[in-house]
Image (spheres, rainbow, N blue to C red):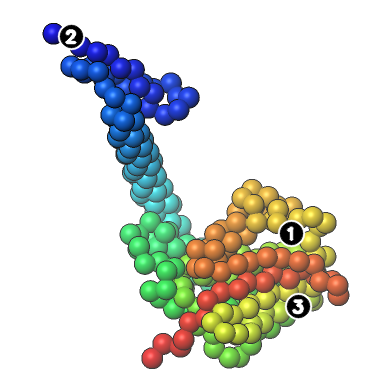
């Protein structure tokens, strides 16, 4: 019995080879067919290996999120335990600031639950959010910061529906508002506006601060980039990620009259019945 050994490269120029033992000499067409089949199998195995690695990473991240949730809930529980004791020691002015602190703790707890929940429809059009009402709600939550600088917040009265949910899009509104508040001078103004056209809407937010530094129009959306005192450089990166996931675009610019302006183009959603 005579066996013939063929050493066939899996990919041209690659380091992997297929060893084939044949009872008879293979013609060039048969060798080529073997190589094509081998390459297909190699690609499938590579894809399977990548999927297994990704799934392992996802499993680890889910476990990490659950651990973080557990630890933070314990901390929130302790904070909520001490809140009534602290409130009883405050005067009227202190209780005003205390209400904002308590609502923030409650909101953080709700957001934590929302972030780790299995919500595959989040931000994909299954829910709708009315932007005007959301801005009003977030301004109320951030009222201590707004009052501290005596800022004026303006936004249209008309209703505008966007394809997202409150928990998700409030992160966009909060991050844009907090940046505008941080860079606005005392007594300045922050102006929201929007205009619908075709099936999209243009939303803008402009402040009366110093504007952007030269060449940082794109840098500010990078994770970790910031020159805001005490900033982490994550807020605008999160906002861009959410807007992009919703099928929109976001950019920033410095206005000729001064101040920075952030613009968002998002799909327009009909008002729900």
At 57% from the left and 84% from the top, the residue drawn is 198
Packing grade of label 3 (10 A; few <14, some 14-19, many >=20) is: some
Visible in this render: residue 88?
A: no
Residue 231 vs residue 81: left or right? right
Circles 2 and 1: CB distance less than 8 Å? no
Residue holding disc 2: 2
Where residue 189 is drawn, which disc sits there? 3
- Residue at coordinates 35% horizontally, 59% vertically from top-left? 117
Q: Is residue 114 above or below residue 62?
A: below
- The Cα atoms of the two marked residues, 1 and 3, are separated by 21 Å
SS at mark 1 in the image: loop
| Sequence-first tag of 2 and 3 | 2
Residue occupying the point 79% across, 75% down = 188
Q: Nearer the viewer, residue 39 or 176?
A: 39
Query: Residue reaching furthest right?
Result: 257
Choose the circle earlier in sequence order: 1 or 3: 3
**Horizontal and vertical percent position of residue 257:** 86, 75
* Residue marked by disc 1: 217
Q: How many marks?
A: 3
SS at mark 2 in the image: loop
**Height in image: 203 above or below 26?**
below
> Tag on residue 179?
none
Q: Quadrant of the N terminus?
A: top left
SS type, badge 3:
strand
């Amino acid at each position: 019995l005579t066996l013939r050994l063929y050493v066939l490269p899996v990919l041209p120029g690659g380091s992997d080879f297929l060893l084939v033992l044949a009872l008879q000499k293979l013609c060039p067409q048969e060798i080529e067919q073997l190589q094509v089949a081998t390459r297909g199998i190699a690609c499938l195995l590579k894809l399977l290996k990548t999927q297994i690695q990704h799934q392992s990473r996802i499993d680890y991240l889910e476990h990490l999120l659950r651990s973080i949730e557990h630890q933070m809930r314990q901390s929130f529980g302790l904070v909520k335990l001490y809140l009534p004791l602290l409130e009883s020691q405050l005067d009227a002015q202190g209780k005003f600031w205390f209400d904002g602190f308590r609502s923030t703790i409650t909101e953080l707890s709700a957001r934590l639950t929302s972030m780790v929940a299995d919500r595959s429809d989040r931000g994909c059009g299954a829910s709708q959010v009315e932007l005007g009402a959301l801005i009003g709600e977030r301004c109320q939550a951030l009222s201590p910061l707004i009052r501290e600088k005596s800022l004026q917040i303006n936004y249209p009265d008309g209703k505008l529906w966007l394809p997202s949910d409150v928990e998700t899009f409030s992160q966009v509104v909060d991050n844009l508002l907090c940046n505008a508040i941080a860079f606005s001078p005392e007594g300045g103004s922050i102006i929201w506006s929007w205009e619908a056209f075709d099936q999209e809407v243009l939303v803008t937010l402009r402040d009366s601060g110093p504007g952007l530094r030269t060449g940082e129009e794109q840098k500010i959306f990078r994770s970790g980039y910031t020159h805001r005192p005490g900033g982490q450089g994550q807020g605008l990166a999160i906002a861009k990620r959410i807007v992009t996931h919703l099928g929109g675009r976001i950019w920033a610019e410095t206005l000729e009259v001064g101040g920075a302006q952030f613009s968002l183009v998002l799909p327009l959603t009909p008002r729900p019945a």
